[in-house]
Image (cartoon, rainbow, N blue to C red):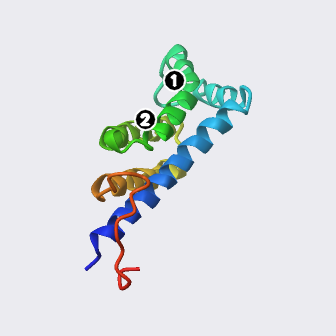
Amino acid sequence: MISEQKLKDAERMVRITMILILLTAGTSKFFSGDGFFNYYSQLFQGDLRINLPPLLINLYLKVIPFIEIFLGFSLFMNKYKNYTVYAWFVFMLSLLFGHYILQEWSSVNQMLGYIFLGLLCFILPNHSSWFNKSSYNESNG
């Protein structure tokens, strides 16, 4: 049987991974100039099965880095963890949908890992604080 302490530690590691993914992705988009925006905006203007209005696509592409940074910092707050994980699901599903529209099937499959990461974060119990030093028994690690 896995102790609750270890499950809470696992949740903390999963959440740190999610935070790093989001903050790295968001800041890299900010520092790419318009590279991210130009690349994906052009892809969405191609000959695709599903065509969304360019205004909608371009607006969402401009907002993505802000969403990533916001979610990354929000995951630090235990009080809003569940809401942030729901937002993570919505955001990741929107990215999955975008890759589906672009017919990037390997990217669609890769997005499933992010969905499961959020699911793991959601179901694991979390510490009451990032700095919580719950007592460890010597046998538990």
Q: Position of residue 6 (x, y in %)?
A: 35, 70
Pointer 1 and pointer 2: residues touching (CB < 8 Å)? yes
Residue at numbered disc 2: 94
| Residue matched to label 1 | 60
- Which one is nearer the viewer's eye here, 128 or 92? 128
For marks 1 and 2, give the CA distance: 10 Å
Residue 96 in the image, given as x and y percentages of width and height: 45, 41
Residue 122, above or below 101: below
- Crowding around mark 1 (Cα neighbors within 10 Å: few <14, some 14 to 19, many 20+) is some
In depth, the one of 39 and 84 nearer the eye is 84
Q: Secondary structure at mark 2?
A: helix
Where the N terminus falls, by quadrant?
A: bottom left
Asked whether residue 12 appears in the rendered view, the answer is yes
State the image coordinates of residue 25 (x, y, percent, origin top left): 60, 41
Q: Quadrant of the C terminus?
A: bottom left
Amino acid marked by disc 1: Tyr
Determine if residue 110 is in view: no
Q: Nearer the viewer, residue 120 or 42?
A: 120
Q: Residues within 10 Å of mark 2 (few under 14, many from 20)?
A: few
Residue 69, disc: none
Residue 73 x, y percent position in the rendering: 49, 38
Instruction: Identify the residue at horizontal 39%, vertical 50% (top origin).
Output: 115
Element under disc 1 = helix
59 relative position to 24: left or right:
left
Considering every residue shown, the one lying at the far bottom of the view is: 139
Most extreme residue toward the top, as rendered?
A: 55
Residue visible at 37% across and 39% down in the picture: 84
Q: Amino acid at mark 2?
A: Ser
Which quadrant of the view contains residue 63?
top right
- Quadrant in the rendering for residue 65: top right
How many labels were placed on the picture?
A: 2
Q: Earlier in the sequence, mark 1 or mark 2?
A: 1
